Amino acid sequence: MGFSGKWVSSRNSVLELKQDGAKISGTFDSGVADEGVMKVPVIGWANGDRIAFTCSYEKYGTVIAWAGQMADEEGYPRIEAKFLHESDVKEENEAEFLWAATRIGSDIFVKQ
């Protein structure tokens, strides 16, 4: 089974992916940060059942990268992934606040 298709996360984000060999493309629509109103392009790579993909929210000054693995137990495919969410810190504030610019988390995407 490949990564192409629609995936919905536990936080109601929608990830629509197209897999062409090892290349991944598609869109991500956050169910959290943008209240589901802004799809952004996704690019990434697959290696067997592992995946890495990224997107950028220019409006919010953030970039996000996920890495994870697909599991398919009893016909319910899911991607369990960790993410790094990097927020912009204005240059004049970097010395004091750059340490807080990166959030780390995880999510599970279920194929629809």
Image: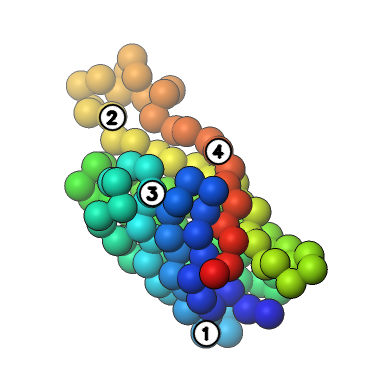
Residue at (52, 84) in percent of width and height: 20
- Distance between the alpha carbons at the discs numbered 3 and 2: 23 Å
- Distance between the alpha carbons at the discs numbered 4 and 1: 27 Å
Q: Amino acid at mark 4?
A: Gly
Mark yes or no: residue 82 visible. yes
Query: Which tag, 4 or 1, sits closer to the chain's start?
Result: 1
Give the vertical position of 108 relative to 22 (above or below): above
Q: Nearer the viewer, mark 4 or mark 2?
A: 4
**How far across and down, in percent of the image, does residue 63 sit?**
37, 48
Q: Nearer the viewer, mark 3 or mark 1?
A: 3
Query: Which tag, 3 or 4, sits closer to the chain's start?
Result: 3
Q: Nearer the viewer, mark 3 or mark 4?
A: 3
Give the vertical position of 110 relative to 1 (above or below): above
Q: Nearer the viewer, mark 1 or mark 2?
A: 1
Query: Which tag, 4 or 2, sits closer to the chain's start?
Result: 2
**How far across and down, in percent of the image, does residue 84 sit?**
50, 42
What label sits on residue 105 in the rendered view?
4
- Distance between the alpha carbons at the discs numbered 3 and 1: 26 Å
Q: Nearer the viewer, residue 48 or 18?
A: 18
What label sits on residue 20 in the rendered view?
1
Q: Nearer the viewer, mark 4 or mark 1?
A: 4
Q: Mark 1: which secondary structure?
A: strand
Badge 3: how crowded within 10 Å, few (<14), some, or many (20+)? some
Q: Amino acid at mark 3?
A: Gly
**How far across and down, in percent of the image, does residue 86 sit?**
40, 39
Residue at (48, 46) in percent of width and height: 11
Question: Looking at the rendering, in which quadrant would you find the N terminus?
Answer: bottom right
Residue indicated by mark 3: 31
Q: Mark 2: which secondary structure?
A: loop
Residue 61 occupies which quadrant of the picture? top left
